């Protein structure tokens, strides 16, 4: 059937491609036939002469295509006949071939099979290492030290040590200060109601839960807290994690897998970066808060999708943004971005004065994390006393909705007061309770910038204003923010204290920078 | 096949630190199930899957009501949010037996606890609380090894004081404004407890692994990880960017071969030598109940100049004559382990984890740990609970109560394991491990076992695929020092009875130390 191929494909070999082999066999065949002298010898004679047909058909085809088409039907029957003949001939050859021949050919076939399946010949195989050489290599190998040495005066080794509660009035390194560094926005860290709730829980449950949520680590307090959070956020369902960092870092890889695409803001915090890394998805970074840039990326992706619609049908796409960016103090332009959010992830370690984090959204979305959120499934659950503290904090927030307006007003005040310091620039929204002070002009070296800012922080600390630089792992951050001092506003700070803080920062900055 | 691994402690450490020298033979068994059990197990999954497809078909055509939460209409044309198979398994297999997990507790997870009764009116799609409380359930599920979790009593006075003084949160990171004097006190105590130079503590055990392993190794480094390591270790290894190779569970030949090949052949493609090799193992494996073969691993790591990271999440406090974990259990100098990691969730009844070792290691971790820079530090009352528990174990409270608890745990473990084995259950792991997995194999029996046990007011953990290999579903008992002999006997009696009912006494190697336990019927079953 495959005797003829269109000429464009080049020369097509007729069936007699196997001709030479057969011809090679035929002398012995005939000899055998004669020797045998029985009916089997008659068979080749009765069969139509093979070679003639084999050759003619392709010749026609090659020379004249239309003719070949016209003769298609005829050609097919002929080809069939030829094929039949070939088979008959082969079977006969088998019968008639001498034993030594068959054995020889059999060995040849086996040899070919061996060659086909044996590994490619490699020079290396011959130069296999001897045991002695191996031992020498092992002896020779010297690993790098497990950790490189750290200089003793690294700032991280000389922590601020807080003695006593880390609340509004704080004792840092033995010096009493007003706290402008902890994210205690609503001042609940020191709240007696929160403490009382935690204490009641301690009395009933003790401290630890001794198990993950699945294995007797689900307490009634956890269920209550999840209910309360869902209601507070006006969503269907909430899920709590026992560590703030692990919340978003587990939630992202629960949905986004290898091959999926995540569009993420350049200024996204480290927990998001780690979540993205764990998801092994395709990451597309857009400029901070730049919706045009995001749109550009989305359009690029659309073009990409049109090229490969099959892949596009199975590729999930996610957009990850932060509400208020921890690294910049700016707010995400949510209304421009989207009209609906699938999942909100938040932290209970700041305003809620507890530990842990939560995700909330529709049940369809959230429920999936109960089996796929690694930090949820494989970690001990949140100690009940911390859950109880968070519930009480929620109560306080719901009872005093005015608290947020107070905070906002305080933010606005200190923002205004900090404008116009020569050498320092305020970064962040005027209503954001955490914002950054950057150097107006960098000295050109990060190290020097950090030193200058640390000098400002130290001097403020001496004057009873506790501040801190925003710390990053310089080498790990995808887009390292410039060095900055982070100022945190809380409702507990009085107007007087806010003014004093602003004035102190101003004076110190001027003394240090000018 | 009955595999008994006899581990002679031939690698005697030079330094003993004045501690009692332990020379014991450790027997770990992983008996294989009879063939017919495996066949039935796979059949069980097969039938479940077939029915799943049938019901999915019925749901698709609207013949059966679909109770699962569904995507909203306006997002129907989106790419599905989760993968199909995962969803299939949850919907059709897990859903049938999901009442055995996430059972809500409403008291301290001590040796007894109370549970909220819940029922389902729609075959486990939703649960409804009846408002009743199931009182005094014997707790064999919580990792409360030393029984240090209980409702408030006078021994927790310091925890209460710290809570009243400090509050619950910290609202800052270790590097910024979140290092409290309590943290420092705890770290010094942990270092002292473990007999090492320094330690650092973190707010979550899971994160201690996943956020610190990447600090130690990176590109160009090799991680050799036990195949049964916990998810957090695996995640940390993956985030580090190092090449990961796994060796067979607790198999020294497999580890040595990987070590040799790694050093001899270097990195794939580039053929450069590896920068460093880190071996990741756990002290006690929580699903197998096996104990790491530490003496052999330490010998290997010394021979091949690799580094060793031991996750003692389950072993710290629970093994060793004074509860100092696997290094003490084997009489090995803790300095021979490069990185000691552990959690405070289990033996200490709190939350969080630690990394301990040489001062330079801990200093490096302090500076570079993701957790130290970006995560909120440990809650002060939680830190105080660890301090109190640790002091108790160390005898710093002036009593021998801590030591008694450690010894009681060892006694309970020995008794419980021995009795279960005599009954003819296949149990996995080391004779000294307080985590006792009983093999049930079939998914249906898993659910039945847990439900029957709850009826008898005993809470056990059951696990199946994907936490274990498909055909090796099991129940897990966690022994506590707070379990009394009466409680254990009650549990054993119930297990015995249900074991007969469900026919899960699969072991063909009955230890006939107490032949009087067997009656004629059980012998007939064996034939």
Image (cartoon, grey):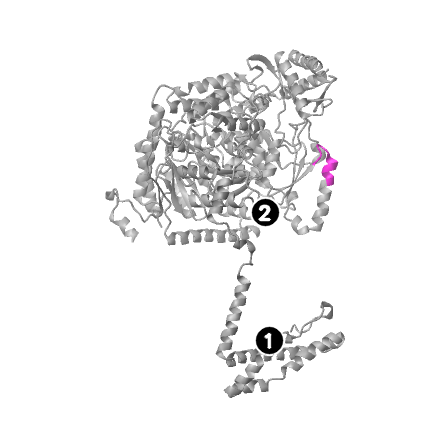
Name the residue: 23% across, 43% down.
B516
- A513 left or right, relative to B229: right
What label sits on residue A21 in the rendered view? 1
The quarter of the picture where residue B317 lies is top left
Q: Position of residue B338 (x, y in %)?
A: 47, 32
Q: Are marks 1 and 2 in contact (CB under 8 Å)?
A: no
What label sits on residue B392 in the rendered view? none
- B341 left or right, relative to B323: right
User: Is residue A292 magenta-colored?
Assistant: yes
Q: Position of residue B222 (x, y in %)?
A: 53, 40
The quarter of the picture where residue A367 lies is top right
Along the line of sight, the residue nearer the viewer: B285 or B47: B285
- Mark 1 packing: few (<14 Cα in 10 Å), some, or many (20+)? few
For marks 1 and 2, give the CA distance.
45 Å
Q: Position of residue A246 (x, y in %)?
A: 55, 33
Check disc 2 and report the residue beneath it: B269
Q: Quadrant of the N terminus of chain A?
A: bottom right
Is the same chain shared between marks 1 and 2? no
- Mark 2 packing: few (<14 Cα in 10 Å), some, or many (20+)? few
Q: Position of residue A3 (x, y in %)?
A: 66, 74
Q: Is residue B153 above or below residue B206?
A: above
Along the line of sight, the residue nearer the viewer: A129 or A297: A129
Q: Quadrant of the C terminus of chain A?
A: top right
Q: Write the start and end of the magenta stretch as one range.
A: A286-296
Name the residue: 54% across, 26% down.
B366
User: Is residue A2 magenta-colored?
Assistant: no
């Amino acid at each position: 059937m495959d005797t003829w191929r269109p000429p464009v494909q080049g020369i097509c070999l007729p069936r007699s491609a196997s001709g030479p082999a057969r011809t090679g066999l035929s002398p012995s065949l005939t000899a055998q036939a004669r020797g045998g002298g029985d009916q089997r010898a008659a068979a080749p004679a009765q069969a139509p002469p093979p070679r003639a047909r084999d050759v003619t058909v392709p010749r026609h085809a090659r020379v004249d295509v239309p003719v070949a088409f016209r003769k298609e039907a005829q050609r097919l029957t002929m080809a069939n006949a030829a094929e039949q003949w070939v088979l008959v001939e082969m079977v006969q050859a088998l019968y008639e071939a001498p034993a030594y021949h068959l054995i020889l050919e059999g060995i040849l076939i086996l040899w070919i099979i061996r060659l086909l399946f044996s590994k490619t010949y490699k020079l290396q195989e011959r130069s296999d290492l001897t045991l002695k050489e191996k031992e020498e290599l092992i002896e020779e190998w010297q690993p790098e030290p497990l950790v490189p040495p750290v200089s003793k005066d690294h700032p991280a080794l000389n922590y601020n040590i807080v003695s006593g509660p880390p609340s509004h009035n704080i004792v840092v390194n033995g010096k009493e200060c007003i706290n402008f560094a902890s994210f205690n926005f609503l001042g609940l860290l020191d709240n007696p109601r929160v403490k009382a709730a935690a204490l009641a829980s301690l009395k009933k449950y003790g401290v630890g839960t001794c198990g993950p949520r699945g294995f007797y680590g689900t307490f009634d307090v956890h269920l209550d807290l999840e209910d309360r959070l869902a209601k507070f956020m006006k969503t269907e369902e909430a899920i709590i994690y026992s560590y703030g960092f692990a919340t978003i870092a587990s939630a992202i890889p629960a949905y986004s897998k290898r091959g999926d695409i995540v569009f993420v803001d350049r200024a996204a915090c480290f927990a998001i970066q780690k979540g993205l890394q764990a998801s092994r998805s395709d990451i597309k970074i857009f400029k901070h808060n730049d919706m045009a840039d995001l749109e550009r990326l989305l359009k690029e992706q659309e073009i990409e999708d049109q090229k490969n619609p099959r892949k596009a049908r199975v590729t999930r796409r996610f957009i990850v943004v932060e509400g208020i960016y921890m690294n910049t103090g700016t707010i995400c332009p949510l209304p421009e971005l989207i009209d609906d959010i699938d999942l909100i992830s938040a932290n209970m370690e700041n305003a809620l004065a507890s530990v842990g984090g939560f995700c909330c959204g529709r049940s369809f979305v959230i429920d999936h994390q109960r089996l796929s959120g690694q930090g949820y499934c494989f970690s001990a659950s949140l100690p009940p006393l911390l859950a109880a503290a968070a519930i009480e904090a929620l109560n306080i927030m719901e009872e005093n909705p005015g608290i947020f307006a107070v905070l906002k007003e305080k933010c606005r005040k200190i923002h205004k007061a900090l404008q116009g310091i020569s050498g320092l620039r305020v970064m962040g929204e005027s209503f954001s309770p955490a914002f950054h002070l950057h150097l107006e002009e960098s000295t050109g070296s990060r190290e020097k910038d950090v030193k200058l800012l640390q000098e400002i922080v130290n001097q403020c600390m001496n004057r009873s204003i506790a501040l801190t630089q925003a710390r990053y792992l310089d080498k790990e951050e995808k887009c390292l923010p410039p060095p900055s001092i982070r100022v945190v506003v809380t409702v507990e700070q009085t107007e007087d204290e806010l003014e004093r803080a602003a004035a102190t920062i101003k004076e110190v900055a001027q003394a240090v920078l000018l | 096949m009955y595999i008994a691994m006899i581990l002679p402690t031939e690698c005697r450490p030079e330094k003993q630190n004045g501690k009692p020298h332990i020379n014991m033979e450790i027997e770990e068994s992983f008996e294989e199930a009879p063939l017919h059990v495996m066949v039935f197990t796979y059949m069980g999954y097969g039938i479940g899957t077939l029915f799943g497809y049938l019901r999915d078909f019925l749901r698709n055509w609207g013949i059966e009501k679909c109770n699962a939460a569904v995507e909203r209409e306006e997002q129907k044309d989106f790419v599905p949010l989760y993968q199909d198979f995962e969803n299939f398994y949850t919907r059709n297999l897990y859903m049938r037996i999901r009442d055995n997990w996430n059972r809500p507790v409403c008291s301290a997870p001590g040796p007894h606890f109370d549970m909220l009764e819940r029922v389902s009116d729609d075959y486990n799609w939703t649960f409804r609380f009846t408002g009743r409380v199931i009182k005094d359930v014997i707790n064999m599920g919580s990792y409360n090894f030393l029984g240090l979790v209980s409702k408030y009593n006078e021994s927790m006075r310091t925890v209460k004081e710290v809570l009243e003084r400090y509050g619950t949160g910290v609202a800052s990171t270790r590097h910024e404004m979140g290092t409290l004097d309590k943290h420092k006190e705890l770290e010094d105590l942990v270092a002292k407890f473990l007999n090492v130079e320094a330690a650092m503590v973190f707010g979550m055990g899971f994160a201690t692994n996943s956020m610190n392993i990447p600090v130690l190794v990176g590109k160009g480094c090799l991680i050799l990880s036990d195949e049964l390591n916990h998810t957090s270790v695996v995640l940390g290894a993956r985030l580090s960017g190092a090449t990961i190779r796994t060796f067979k569970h607790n198999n020294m030949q497999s580890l040595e071969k990987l070590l040799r090949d790694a050093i001899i052949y270097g990195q794939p493609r580039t053929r450069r030598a590896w920068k460093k090799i880190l071996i990741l193992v756990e002290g006690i494996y929580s699903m197998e109940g096996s104990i790491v073969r530490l003496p052999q691993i330490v010998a290997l790591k010394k021979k091949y100049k690799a580094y060793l990271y031991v996750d003692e999440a389950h072993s710290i406090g629970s093994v060793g004559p004074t509860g100092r974990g696997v290094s003490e259990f084997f009489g090995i100098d803790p300095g021979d382990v490069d990185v000691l990691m552990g959690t405070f969730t289990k033996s200490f009844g709190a939350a969080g984890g630690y990394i301990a070792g040489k001062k330079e290691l801990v200093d490096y971790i302090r500076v570079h740990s993701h957790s130290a820079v970006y995560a909120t530090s440990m809650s002060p009352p939680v830190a105080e609970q660890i301090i109190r528990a640790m002091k108790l174990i160390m005898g710093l409270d002036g009593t021998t109560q801590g030591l008694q608890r450690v010894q009681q745990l060892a006694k309970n473990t020995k008794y419980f394991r021995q009795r279960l084995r005599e009954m003819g259950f296949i149990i996995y792991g080391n004779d000294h491990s307080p985590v006792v997995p009983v093999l049930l194999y079939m998914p249906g029996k898993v659910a039945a076992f847990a439900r029957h046990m709850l009826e008898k007011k005993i809470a056990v953990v059951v696990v199946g695929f994907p936490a274990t290999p498909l055909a090796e579903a099991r129940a897990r008992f966690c022994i506590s020092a707070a379990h009394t002999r009466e409680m254990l006997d009650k549990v054993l009696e119930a297990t015995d009875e249900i074991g007969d009912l469900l026919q899960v006494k699969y072991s063909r190697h009955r230890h006939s130390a107490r032949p009087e336990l067997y009656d004629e019927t059980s012998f007939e079953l064996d034939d």
